[in-house]
Amino acid sequence: MVKEKLYTLIQSPIITEQTARLGENFKQIVFKVDLSANKREIKKAVEELFKVEVLGVTTSIVKGKRKRNRFGMYKKSNYKKAFVSISEDSEIQFEGIN
């Protein structure tokens, strides 16, 4: 896979309290990925970028919410979440990444 495609496929990690609990209990990391990405591409991208062993990938599409402000209604964009299960001896640290 082309290196540029790897960097555009995974957009950002989703770091919340719920995803932190997933990481502690089930060794899962949650990423915001491109809508056109499939599970095989996500697995390969995570393995090559973070040098970890991926056991499985689960994806879900989050529908954008409808919001309203003083100028009228608008809709936020849809995005895809990828729940990546990594092996017990693997670990990904996000503290030093900007």
Image: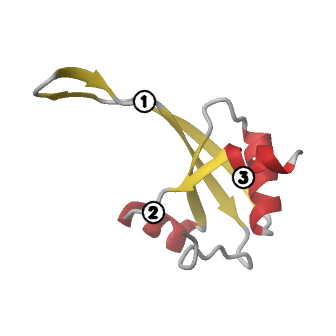
Crowding at label 3, few (<14), some or many (≥20) Cα neighbours within 10 Å? some
Q: Secondary structure at mark 3?
A: strand
Check the image and name the residue furthest to the left: 70
Q: Is residue 93 left or right of residue 38?
A: left
Q: Is residue 62 left or right of residue 86?
A: left
Image location (x, y in percent) of residue 58: 63, 44
Of badges 1 and 2, the one in the foreground is 1
Residue for badge 1: 77
* Picture layout, residue 28 above or below residue 1: below
Residue for badge 3: 56
Of badges 2 and 3, the one in the foreground is 2
Q: Are marks 1 and 2 in contact (CB under 8 Å)?
A: no
Q: Quadrant of the N terminus?
A: top right
Q: Tell me the residue at 79%/47% (across/down).
A: 4
Check the image and name the residue furthest to the right: 1
Image location (x, y in percent) of residue 38: 72, 35
Q: Tell me the residue at 60%/68% (across/down).
A: 27
Q: Secondary structure at mark 1?
A: loop
Look at label 1 and name its amino acid.
Answer: Ser
Mark 3 to mark 1: distance in Å?
26 Å
Of badges 3 and 1, the one in the foreground is 1
Q: Are marks 2 and 3 in contact (CB under 8 Å)?
A: no
Look at label 2 and name its amino acid.
Answer: Ile
User: Could you say which disc has been placed on residue 15 in the image?
Assistant: 2
